[in-house]
Image (tube, rainbow, N blue to C red):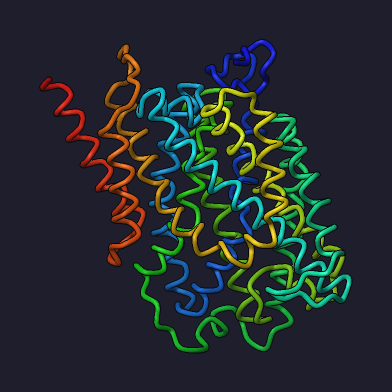
Amino acid sequence: MSNKKTDIDYTTSAVDKSGRKSNLSMFMIMLGFTFFSASMWVGQQLAAGLDWSGFLWALILGGLILAAYTGALGWIGAESGLSLDMLSRRSFGTKGSWLPSAMISFTQTGWFGVGLAMFAIPVAKEMMGLEVTPDSMPWQGYVLVAVAGVLMTASAYFGIKSLTVISYIAVPAVAILGTVAMLMAIHNGDAGLVEQFAKGSKDLGVIAGAGLVVGSFVSGGTATPNFTRFAKNAKVGLWTTVAAFFIGNSLMFLFGAVSSIYVGGNDIFEVMLNLNLFYLAVLVLGLNIWTTNDNALYTAGLGLSNIFGLSKKTMVLVSGVIGTVAAVWLYWNFCGWLNVLNCTLPPVGIILILHYFLNRGKDVKEKVVDWGAVTGVVAGAVVANLLHWGFASINGMAVAALCWGIGQFVAKRK
């Protein structure tokens, strides 16, 4: 295993004082983490089902739930200095931690591949005039996927320093250019934002809308400790996470909503194309996906390193190759399955939170497998996917917490 003197990503150890980053760097990293193109799809759904007032209330309610969940994980990561996988070793056991590591590695590699195709397919259509369908992808499209895959894998390979540089470049560019394009679309439209939101059949309640907001990033948010462990202290880990999730997610939802009601597409890329800002559109699309994809691959590398005992860099390369090769197929065939798998991650997060705060300051001996935690994740994932009531992620977390609590009670009685 790597040691912390040569491993700048502290794969198997807590981040020490010398590895901590500035508050601004942490904010940029976390904001870039939340710049997730798929969230714009959710913005489109929200715009179709809610008026302006309902849209705002859904963002606020869903944002508060996300902030509570990711904020707690942000605090834990910063205070402990440990990654999601090292925290899992304490909560799930040394070998039990392979389950959450495998789950998050699989989903994040999958979303990395989908993100590559989300960049390559629109650019192939608009820049090259190619016809792309689920059954046909011209070779030029695959070249775009390969080039994007190499660049994004490289930034994840070089670790937290590279992620920081990408965030400093991408976050201001996406936020400023995307906001300007959105305001231009509203200015050029036939109606104001409130009036435009009022059009169409509004058949989505605020609670259901908030559920979409929570579901959009609650799974990815489970990886929050992987990044906040570099914060100077727990308070910084908390506020940078909460602020980033509110600002970043809100921007993504607004970009998706505005593009939908003014242009008919589902992201700011189409708004910018409609405004004849083609090259800026490509830049914004690429940077937006890059900030999420390198974080996803970085997370996958840490998870696989925990399972196989190889370096994070090696596992990032493996994940990057798999995600790149499978990108187009994943885009057309696997998004639904990835959304199902997303429901498995919030149960992991709630167990990490409960275990950490209930054992804070105690010398807890690691088990080989904590069967209460493992059972909680499996049961929580099943309930989250099958129970169509309330918030799927919260349902899963409640069941996982109950199973974990029972497991702790039984263990203490032995």
Using the image as rendered, state which of residue 396 and residue 16 is in the foreground: 396
Of residues 401 and 250, the one nearer the viewer is 401
Outermost residue toward the left? 413
Q: Quadrant of the N terminus?
A: top right
Question: Residue 262 placed where, x, y %?
Answer: 66, 81
Horizontal side, residue 95 vs residue 216: left or right = left
Q: Position of residue 280 (x, y in %)?
A: 83, 63
Question: Which of the 4 image quadrants contains residue 165?
Answer: top right
Task: Answer above or below: position of 168 versus 338.
Answer: above
Q: Is residue 54 above or below residue 378?
A: below
Residue at the image position 84 percent from the left and 75 percent from the top = 130
Query: Is residue 184 at least partly visible in the picture?
Result: no
Could you tell me how many numbered marks the image carries?
0
374 left or right, relative to 136: left
Residue in front for this viewpoint, 414 or 224: 414
Q: Is residue 360 above or below residue 266?
A: above
Above or below, comparing residue 78 to residue 132 in the picture: above
- Residue 378 position, x and y percent, is 32, 45
Q: Is residue 291 left or right of residue 376?
A: right
**Residue at the location (71% across, 56% down)?**
116
Q: Quadrant of the C terminus?
A: top left
